[in-house]
Every structure is written in structure tokens, then in C-alpha cells.
Amino acid sequence: MKDDLKGDQISRILQIYSKLLDGYVVNKAEEATRHGVNERSIQRDIDSIRNFLDEDSERTGIINTVIYDRNVKGYRLETIYQMKLQNCEILAFCKILLDSRAFTKLEMTEMLDKLISCCVPMVNQKRVKELIRNEEFHYVEPRHKTRFIETMWDLGQAISESKYIEIDYYRTKDKSVVHRKLRPAAIMFSEYYFYLTAFIDDEDVKKDFSVLDDAFPTIYRIDRIRSLKILNEKFNIPYTNRFEEGEFRKRIQFMYGGKLQKVKFKYTGPDIDAILDRLPTAQILDEENGAYIISAEVFGTGINMWLRSQGTYVESIQ
């Protein structure tokens, strides 16, 4: 008798699932009447299908769910999206986000919740949240406490459409707000902050730079942009002269601008890989008894800060 009941339940679930797959709307009352059971049984069947879809998404990479549609007064199958990331990848992204400390605590919490709820099957969401709970609780937001994501998106649009922008920018060296008209080139991230890399056309502004090369490109922390206006005026940069942020990123430390230069130093620390990862343009010129002679091509003065941070492990060579 129990086997018969179980068989009936399985048959009923498969029929409802097949109906959903075919795009039909499942009405709970109608299904209860058709199968001779109460509506609670049909609700349990629908819950079983939901659980199956959550678990099956890890295998198929496609996240489906059964939703209640008020417009048609019934349940239907909805494909939310094709999942591109595995649970372990989502966990890695959450850890990287937390370690970046780039956003306010509220923004960070919102992004983590959205990332987990959108990309992790419901059956595993609790586990992922548990694995980041302590770091999220103790998260320390940046001191500027500024929400700038929408500004960053607007800058991205201006870059994509090659439009000039005007900004009012808070300059920390003299605690003043300066006005700039810029050709935006790229958005970059480094050491807790997002930056805008841009070009200045105004020759009078360039005269204020101690090193002429500092004016090309200039670097602005996005959280310090007090106002932004995207102009209808467009600029044109030939493809051969386009700004390549990937190449620029290899050569800059701490996002301090300046002229292109080559540095040479001796490294006697315990992990040469850490140096080569930090300076993608670095080349080992010589090695003897654990002491490495390194040469690297870099932009700006940030390299001096990094070299000093290595203490006795690094010795500059002229």
C-alpha cells in the first residue's frame, strides 16, 4: 500500500514537472482535483521540484525555478540565467571583494548578498554565507565613506563613448577643489581605491605639473570626484595611440603618476615570486647565492615607496 502511495506521488510529481517543462501553468486547485489529493500535497510536490532544480543547477549550470505568477494565478517554470560560476568561484569572489575594502559596509553587504543569491543555488547559500560571515562582520570600510559606484558607471559610459568630461576634484596636497576638463581613458583599481586615468588638453593646467610626463596620463581617485558632468563633445584617439590600461597597470605602483623609467635593484628576501608578481615587467638579470639583480620598467614615483617598504631586502643600484 505504501509503495503504491509512493508510486502515485512520484508519478504525480513527474507529471507536474513535465507540464512545467512544456511551458504550461500549474494551478494548485486544478491539480489537486485531477490527482484526487488536497492542495497541501500539490504544494509539497512543487517544493520537491524546486529542491531538485536547485540541486540540478550545479550539474547543468542552468538555474531554473518554479515561481507563482499572480497574473495567471498559477505556477510556472522560469529560467533565471545560465550559471557561469561554481560555488567555489563565488566564494573566491566574495573573499576578494572583502579583502579589497573598496566599498562602504552597506555597499559591501548588498553586493555580497546579491552575488550569493543570484549565483549560488539555494541549497548552498547558507554554507557560503557561513564561510564569509566572520570577515563580513568585522569588515572595515574605507575612511572616505563615499558611495561612488554610480559615478564609476557614468565614467565608464563616457570612456566607452569617447566623451569629454568635466569634474570638480578634491586635491589632498593643498585641500582644494580643482576643476578639470578631461579625456577619460580607463578605470583602474589598486590598494583599496578605484581610479580614473585621464588626459588633459589644457596647456595652462599642464604647466603646474613638476614633471611634464605627469600630465599624461593624470590619475584621479574616483571617491574624491565631487561632481561629474559628461559633455556632448567627443574626442578621437587613433587606434595606434589608444591608452592600454593593461600595459600601464604593469608599470605603476600605488597609482602614483610620473614619467616612464627603469629601476634596478638587488633583492635578498625569501620569496622572489612575490617580487615578480608585484612588478610584472621585472626581469632577473643575475642571481648568486639567493641574491637577485632585478630590472623593471615603471611609471611614476610609487616605485620608490614600494622599494622602501621592503626594508633591508632591497638595495637600489644606480
Image (spheres, rainbow, N blue to C red):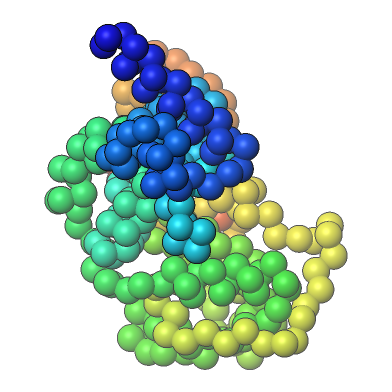
**Residue 234, relative to residue 136: is it above or below?**
below
237 displayed left or right of 41: right
Q: Nearer the viewer, residue 242 or 205?
A: 242
> Percent from the top left, x then y, of residue 302?
44, 56
308 displayed left or right of 203: left
Quarter where residue 145 is shown = bottom left
> Percent from the top left, x then y, of residue 278?
45, 39
Q: Nearer the viewer, residue 221 or 158?
A: 158
Q: Residue at x 75, y 86 (%)?
A: 233
Q: Nearer the viewer, residue 296 or 143?
A: 143
Q: Can I make out residue 92 in this image?
A: no
Q: Residue at x 30, y 48 (%)?
A: 98
Q: Residue at x 61, y 43 (%)?
A: 23
Q: Nearer the viewer, residue 158 or 254?
A: 158
60 displayed left or right of 235: left
> Percent from the top left, x then y, of residue 287?
48, 18
Q: Can I make out residue 162 in this image?
A: yes
Q: Looking at the rendering, in which quadrant would you find the N terminus? A: top left
**Residue 62, relative to residue 101: is it above or below?**
above
Q: Residue at x 38, y 39 (%)?
A: 32
